[in-house]
Image (cartoon, rainbow, N blue to C red):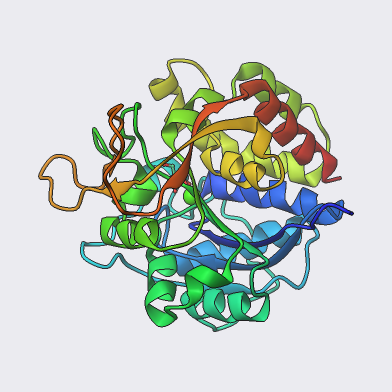
Amino acid sequence: MPARLPKILLDCDTGIDDALTLLYLASLVRTGDAELVGVGTVHGNIDPATGALNTLRVLELAGVEGVPVAVGAGRPMAQDVHYALDWHGQDGLGDTDLPAPAGAPTGEAAAAQIVRLAREHPGELSLLAIGPLTNLAAALLLDGELPGLLREVVIMGGAFDHPGNITTHAEANIWHDPEAADLVLAADWPVTLVPLDVTHPTAVGEQWLTKLAAHDSAAARFAVRILEFYVTAYTPVLKRRGAVVHDALAAMLITNPEVCEYTERPVRVERRGELTRGATVWDARSIPADDDRRASRVATGVDVAAFQDRLLAALLSLD
Ligand code: RIB
Ligand code: CA
């Protein structure tokens, strides 16, 4: 029986690690190892309209055609919008001021696209969320049957036994819209959560960056160019030259789940804490959890070398 071809519906806030993840996904599409059925963009690193143009730029650079890109929610459900311009630049791609893409967004709202594609491909889609979860929450409100229509939901987000990155306790994708995140984690669909606990240890360093820069292709040159800004932002945090390509690890787990280890627990999002709003909370006590929320599969361990090697190989394959 041939292995199932993953059909991926991406929701992103195309910033720099989202762009590298799009290149990773493009490599899977080009080798016939996955299908990218659509992309939605959301507020977060940048506004969703700019995120959509950045997404189109990357897909065109990677030679991936015919993927609908839909602009989504421009703000969170219950707080002011905040962009991560210090980490991703004013244009979301490290202030590289790239030419406008040839294509344009479809005009469909990203949440409506999630519902439409889930109904067109019942039980088949892997919904990959690498930005704030506002579009996913809006889609859940649009269609109460949505959780039963998706194969899986893979989310880059959260922090458990690891500090937050946008506040002391909260990871950015969850913090950008805590109400949406808690709605998504409460829904009855199979969630894999990929938190900072596993993304931060995968931070690429000097040797990885040098191998990427040594490769002569348009995709590699683009990746090097947008990484310059991201590495500059990350180096003081890592205390060495490098950067964390958070989103690519979530994408990789769709085709290569063996790259991580997991535990299953219900996860909730703090929405009222003065200091902890946006934190992901689970009951890690040894007593049986009495939370009736569906458990999420949370990545707790990662094979760093496997991740870094696979990501580099994918980026170098895009000649
Ligand atoms: O916390 C990391 C997440 O926030 C990544 O998705 C990155 O792109 C930013 O959106
Ligand atoms: Ca992102």
**Residue found at x 55% / y 36%:** 245
Indicate the position of residue 135 as horizontal and vertical percent values: 43, 68
In the rendered image, is residue 127 in sight?
Answer: no
Quadrant in the picture for the N terminus: bottom right
Closer to the camera in the image, 10 or 225: 10
Is residue 194 rendered to the left or right of residue 151? left
Vertical position of residue 229 compared to residue 187: above or below: above
Residue 275 position by quadrant: top left
Residue 56 position by quadrant: bottom right
Residue 261 position by quadrant: top right
Indicate the position of residue 146 as horizontal and vertical percent values: 49, 74
Is residue 263 rendered to the left or right of residue 65? left
Is residue 249 rendered to the left or right of residue 315? left
Closer to the camera in the image, 40 or 178: 178
Vertical position of residue 80 compared to residue 117: above or below: above
In the rendered image, is residue 170 in sight?
Answer: yes
Q: Residue furthest right?
A: 1
Indicate the position of residue 51 as horizontal and vertical percent values: 51, 62
Is residue 305 rendered to the left or right of residue 250? right
**Residue found at x 38% / y 55%:** 185
Closer to the camera in the image, 68 or 267: 267
Quadrant in the picture for the C terminus: top right
Q: Please state the total of marks drawn on the protein image.
A: 0
Vertical position of residue 256 compared to residue 308: above or below: below
Indicate the position of residue 182 as horizontal and vertical percent values: 31, 57
